[in-house]
Image (cartoon, rainbow, N blue to C red):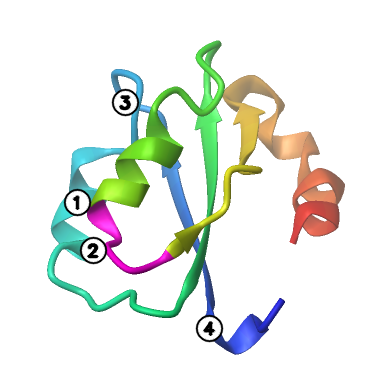
Amino acid sequence: MNWINTFEIMSPIYWGTYAPEMETALQGLDFTGKTVRVISTHEGSGLGCMVSDVKKLCKGADVQSNGLAIKGSKAKESKKTVSDWL
């Protein structure tokens, strides 16, 4: 994987997808040729529709399907999980 062209998009899950502020932040950026991975916190929905929604938002990107979902109540103890995933 080319780490220079790899981006992690992190957001809590809101109503089954990323937080609305993520769309505002990412809208209009050129993701052509970039690799995008998603990571989220949730309280039971896992990644929800975040991966497919990020694919729609990040046109031209290779959005990886193996995102990381961390239960919010376990976030404080997930440092190794995140480190291993990265």
Q: Can you identify the residue that label 4 sits on?
A: 5
**Tag on residue 14?**
3
Q: Over which residues does the magenta segment extend?
A: 57-61
Query: Which mark sits nearer the N-terminus, 2 or 3?
Result: 3
> Residue 58 colored magenta?
yes
Name the residue type under label 1: Glu
Q: CA distance from mark 3 to mark 1?
A: 12 Å
Q: Give the distance between the C-alpha atoms of the residues marked 1 and 4, in whole angstroms.
A: 20 Å
- The vertical placement of 65 against 25, above or below, is above
Q: Is residue 77 left or right of residue 6?
A: right
Q: Give me the disc on residue 23.
A: 1
Disc 2 to disc 3: CB gap under 8 Å: no
Cα separation, mark 2 vs mark 3, equals: 17 Å
Are the residues at dot 4 and dot 2 in contact (C-beta closer than 8 Å)?
no
Q: Secondary structure at mark 2?
A: helix
Residue 2, labelled with which disc? none
Furthest residue toward bottom = 4
Q: Earlier in the sequence, mark 3 or mark 1?
A: 3
User: Rounded to the nearest whole Å, what is the CA distance between mark 4 and mark 3?
Assistant: 27 Å
Q: Residue at x 23, y 63 (%)?
A: 26
Find numbered disc 4 in the image and state the secondary structure of the residue it sits on.
helix
Mark earlier in primary sequence (4, 3): 4
Q: Position of residue 79 (x, y in %)?
A: 79, 49
Q: Is residue 49 above or below residue 28?
A: above
In the rendered structure, find residue 26 and report the number of the disc placed on it. 2
Q: Of tags 3 and 1, which is closer to the observer?
A: 1
Mark 1 residue crowding within 10 angstroms, few (<14) / some (14–19) / many (20+): some
| Mark 1 touches mark 2? (CB < 8 Å) | yes
Q: Amino acid at mark 2?
A: Leu
Quarter that holds the N terminus = bottom right
SS type, badge 3:
loop
Magenta stretch, main secondary structure class: loop
